[in-house]
Amino acid sequence: MTRWLSRIAALVVTGWASLGGVAAQDLSALAYLRPEESRVEASGDETWLTLGLTQPVPYRAFLLDQPPRLVMDFREVDFGAAKPEALLSGKGLSGLRWGKFRPGWSRLVAELPGPMRLVSVTQETEGEDGAVIRAHLEGVPAGAFAPRIGAPDSALWDLPQPAPVDTPHPRQDGSEPLLVVLDPGHGGIDPGADAGDGSEADLVLGFARELKEALRRGGLRVILTREEDVFIPLETRVTVARAAGADLFLSLHADIVPEANVAGATVYLLDEEASDEASQKLAERHDRADLLAGVDLEGHDDEVAHVLMDLARTETQPRSRRLAQVLAGAIKAEGLKMHRRPVQGADFSVLKSPDIPSVLLELGFVSSEVDRERLRDPQWRARMVRAIATGISGWAEGDAAEARLLRQ
Ligand SMILES: [Zn+2]
């Protein structure tokens, strides 16, 4: 076994080293996917994934477990309009996604049908300036699955992580402008729900920008967890908010629900016991999308287990609940359509800051044609922005008054 492990490591290094002879100006240009030269082939328990590119790129490849996945990172590749599913042939791989991972870098994640090993990964130049990257995989018994081999532990490749904060953020009391962290869901390799002509990721980013402007005009400080179409893991969204010292965290989504006739805005709270199966599935789908984008949970301690944090959590929960209720009330008062149960709970990872009141707002569900139209209507969005701004300032006032009262 040791022999093929070192072989993989060597192959990955080759992936880097083979670029030594490529002129610098070639690498500064963006590489494009050539869909007609890209394919997935399978025979027995072997799979070949071939990607045609307009030029060679630095890349790395490694495996992750739970579920078994092949992750390939590249210097930015423009995948164009090609849909990753179009490459799947029904065997060899169970799923494929690609997209921007972080500025300047792209990622491809292939879901494997079971435990496999990377037999080889190569990049060959083709023609004048084109390149072909080929990954060869082979099924192995579960005990022989070896994730993370060939994943260099280098800051160059990995997502920047804000420093974890291990003391609770002091509760806001109105003496300083409120710091709101808006979290446009999804992005990059994880586009979220398909909203017809665009993705959930695009829709909620556009909305977050509009909301940010309105909140700033109202004297609040606002930070977005992402400013562009880029992937941010759920855990990092929480860390960003905590590192910034946020007073309030609002995650924005517009998902698909499989149930027919479900429409209207819905505010979600963190609750390990979901309101119903649909809410639980919604939270699970977000965790799964995070995993399939290539997040590795191995070796992660769940949360900072800390007496101070536990105390903060106990205090934060009712504050989040009030935030959800006040927001739902403000949206209703604006005359906007809400779900028949406007406040619901589910185990959303992104709502797990122990010390920041956090809620997730489904602006609507893009599975509903009516909601899709509303989300695209600038007047509707302006009313939703106004409702949220009113809700946030109403909540902040009551919350600050309570903080002052508790301190006495
Ligand atoms: Zn979503």
Image (cartoon, rainbow, N blue to C red):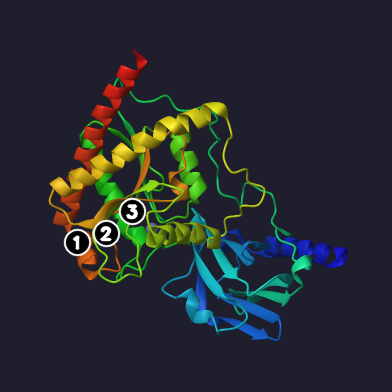
Which of discs 2 and 3 lies nearer the camera? The answer is 2
Work out how far the residue at label 3 is from the one at label 1, CA to CA, in angstroms.
Answer: 16 Å
The amino acid on which the numbered mark 2 sits, given as a three-letter code, is Gly
Q: Position of residue 390 (x, y in %)?
A: 19, 39
Res 250 quadrant in image = top left
Which of discs 3 and 1 lies nearer the camera? The answer is 1
Q: Position of residue 17 (x, y in %)?
A: 72, 61
Among the two numbered marks 1 and 2 on one chain, the one whose residue lies closer to the N terminus:
2
Q: Are marks 1 and 2 in contact (CB under 8 Å)?
A: yes
Instruction: Residue at 51%, 31% (x, y): give it.
Output: 310
Instruction: Residue at 46%, 39% (x, y): give it.
Output: 353
Q: Which residue is mark 3?
A: 205
Among the two numbered marks 3 and 1 on one chain, the one whose residue lies closer to the N terminus:
3
For the residue pair 113 and 59, the one nearer the viewer reads as 113
| The residue carrying mark 2 has its beta carbon less than 8 Å from ligand 1 | no
Mark 3 Cα-neighbour bin, 10 Å: few <14, some 14–19, many ≥20: many
The amino acid on which the numbered mark 3 sits, given as a three-letter code, is Leu
The amino acid on which the numbered mark 1 sits, given as a three-letter code, is Arg
Q: Is residue 337 visible?
A: yes
Q: Which residue is mark 1?
A: 374
Q: Does residue 407 appear left or right of residue 98 in this picture?
A: left
Q: Position of residue 101 (x, y in %)?
A: 51, 57
Q: Position of residue 48 (x, y in %)?
A: 66, 79
Q: Is residue 15 above or below residue 243?
A: below
